Amino acid sequence: MNSSRQDTLTPLYVISITFAIGVTIALILNIYLRESPVFVTGVLVSDHERCTALGQRVLSDHGSSVDAAIAAALCLGVVHPHVSGVGGGGIMMVHDIQKKETRVINFQGTAPKTLTQEMLHNLSEPKAGLQVGVPGMLRGLHRAHRLYGSLSWEDVVSRAAAVAREGFSVSFSLSEAISKVKGEPLSPLFRDLFIPGGQSLHSGSFLRMPGLARVLEAGLSNVYDGNLSQEMVDMVRVNGGVLSREDISNYSVEVEGPVEGLCNDFIIQVPAPPSAATALLLAINILKGFHLNNNTANQTYHWITETMKAALAVGSGLGDPNYNTSVTELLTHMLSTRQADVLRQRIEHTRASLHGWYNSTAHSLQTELHAGQVVVMGSDDLLVSVASSLSRLFGSRLITQSGILLNSLILDFSWPNKATGQQMNQRNGIQPGKRPLTSLMPIIVVPVWDECGIYTALSSSGGLQSLSAITQVLIIALSQDQEKNYTFPPAGLRPQFQPIEVLVDQRRIQDLHEKSHIFHRAKWNSDVQGILRSKDFIKAIAIPPLPDLS
Ligand SMILES: *[C@@H]1O[C@H](CO)[C@@H](O)[C@H](O)[C@H]1NC(C)=O
Ligand SMILES: *[C@@H]1O[C@H](CO)[C@@H](O)[C@H](O)[C@H]1NC(C)=O
Ligand SMILES: *[C@@H]1O[C@H](CO)[C@@H](O)[C@H](O)[C@H]1NC(C)=O
Ligand SMILES: *[C@@H]1O[C@H](CO)[C@@H](O)[C@H](O)[C@H]1NC(C)=O
Ligand SMILES: *[C@@H]1O[C@H](CO)[C@@H](O)[C@H](O)[C@H]1NC(C)=O
Ligand SMILES: *[C@@H]1O[C@H](CO)[C@@H](O)[C@H](O)[C@H]1NC(C)=O
Ligand SMILES: *[C@@H]1O[C@H](CO)[C@@H](O)[C@H](O)[C@H]1NC(C)=O
Ligand SMILES: *[C@@H]1O[C@H](CO)[C@@H](O)[C@H](O)[C@H]1NC(C)=O
């Protein structure tokens, strides 16, 4: 299923990224040689070449790194409307090297005020309207712009709007997403746009979204307080939902510090819950106790796989700390050295663990989440990583007259559900205004001591599998630095570690167990993007869809 995706996409990635690196290394050398700084811009990576180019253009027009990230993220919402957009939300991390300060701008959507858990009881597939949470995308990006923008908001937004108005060529990823959902009951608006005349848009066909261009240009107040807000509410209500205009106008963005973990001479910074990213810190804490460098590859894979299972088992019990104080307690426990030691001791060196071995409650974490990713390091010494999402492919599948696809983030909450038989995560239950546990995880790594050391910013597009992919990339990045060996896997090539798959889905854990866990093909392949910067170089990191090993 995914092999054709690789065949089609990988060469493009390799070409564009390699080009970007070649150009940028030259540019960065310029910074340190203090030559012609006019040409110094920085590096931006994203899921789509058009958005990468758009973001790079913002950088070369003297926009800040955050301006570039905003333009590229909005652009992704246009060319990959199945993944993210105005009707969704996301999380942005920004690190300021000079101030040594990191901010997490959380604009994940929230539950509407009148949505109750009872409305979803025993439902596996709630009505489309009930799946929709309050969208946070534009408010979030706007807040980021107020904090770090240098071009005008209108300038930044209009660049993404231009892509929607002029049109773009449908990517393989979008065409594949359309064919996946086309058998479902879909609204005439959805069909007119993506399946015109009964034919799914195929890769390479041309698509324009002038309505979406107008949405982007209409301004924030129209989306949050004006006609567009009404349009979204009407669409949700007609489809059985409870979203109100007041929910939308009350939406607020959260800006906070990161949660930090230490590894070698690096500080790993991740968003606090309700992002599940703190499970990464637990994984790193466990792995620190193994000697990964002087062991066989087999042994290393085994340890990583078991570690990810343990970290996910604990991480899947998290939720929004603003609504349940036990989340903070769990987090403190989870990040303690003691907990890492206990879990490490539970890992058997020769055998894959059984389900439940790490006290896994196997809470139903969404395994279907798709994220759009943008990572930027400009010449302003800001590092930016932003992940944005509608949750599932095309979110709730509801699309407004103007072309806003509405998210399905309510599905990321946990509720009593006889159909799945999974134990409910009480910390992630539905409450008005609450944000669900999410696998969106932008990550920043900064050196502890040396300001001239290595900085890394990463993001990942796959749901939970992101975590194991990111862990592997970090292990390579961090341990190689320790050995003063900067040979990073070239962009577009796989890391030396083979892929592993760790799903919390019980069935798959069973599979893994039966085979004493050899490596399986994931339902969705992980895809990590990032940028690495030292005083001498700056490199794009791209791990393309992992190979099929089944
Ligand atoms: C959910 O299903 C269980 C068992 O089928 C039933 O006892 C319960 O009343 C249902 N709850 C709701 C709210 O429908
Ligand atoms: C909002 O809708 C009203 C009535 O449909 C219309 O008259 C008005 O021009 C619209 N405002 C904007 C900003 O689109
Ligand atoms: C919106 O905020 C106001 C003031 O804080 C509050 O009274 C109201 O209940 C909120 N409404 C919703 C739907 O959240
Ligand atoms: C790996 O290195 C550590 C410390 O350098 C050592 O204690 C351990 O025995 C080594 N393991 C193997 C398998 O060589
Ligand atoms: C490593 O993997 C190979 C192939 O899967 C297997 O035959 C071998 O026994 C493994 N070695 C160890 C030490 O686990
Ligand atoms: C698993 O849970 C039991 C009971 O809550 C506890 O005693 C035990 O220490 C836990 N084990 C791990 C590895 O966390
Ligand atoms: C908070 O989480 C705890 C532990 O899972 C749970 O027992 C409790 O019911 C939750 N509280 C609320 C208000 O959901
Ligand atoms: C870096 O590591 C690789 C793989 O371990 C090794 O082949 C290479 O020689 C090392 N390079 C340097 C400069 O140490």
Image: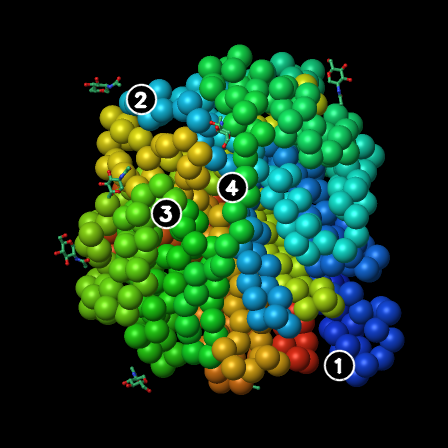
Where residue 518 appears, as percent x and y from the top left, is 32, 56
Give the colour scheme shown: rainbow
Q: Residue at x 64, y 39 (%)?
A: 138
Asked if residue 401 lies left or right of residue 136, the reply is: right
Between marks 3 and 2 in the image, the one whose residue lies nearer the viewer: 3
Q: Which residue is identified by label 1?
A: 32
Q: Residue at x 43, y 54 (%)?
A: 272
Tell me the amino acid under the disc marked 2: Glu
Q: Earlier in the sequence, mark 1 or mark 3?
A: 1
Q: Nearer the viewer, residue 413 or 417?
A: 413
Q: Which residue is identified by label 3?
A: 321
Q: Which residue is identified by label 4?
A: 108
Tell me the amino acid under the disc marked 1: Tyr
Tell me the amino acid under the disc marked 3: Pro
Q: Nearer the viewer, residue 91 or 363?
A: 91
The crowding category of the residue bearing disc 4, from other C-alpha atoms within 10 Å (few below 14, some 14 to 19, many at least 20), is many
State the SS at label 1.
helix
Compute the Cα span from label 1 to label 3: 43 Å
Q: Nearer the viewer, residue 168 or 112?
A: 112
Q: Quadrant of ligand 4?
A: bottom left
Q: Which residue is identified by label 2?
A: 118
Q: Earlier in the sequence, mark 3 or mark 4?
A: 4
The crowding category of the residue bearing disc 2, from other C-alpha atoms within 10 Å (few below 14, some 14 to 19, many at least 20), is few
Where residue 82 appears, as percent x and y from the top left, is 59, 34
Q: Residue at x 49, y 59 (%)?
A: 257
Q: Is 537 placed above or below 152 here?
A: below
Q: Is 121 placed above or below 292 here?
A: above
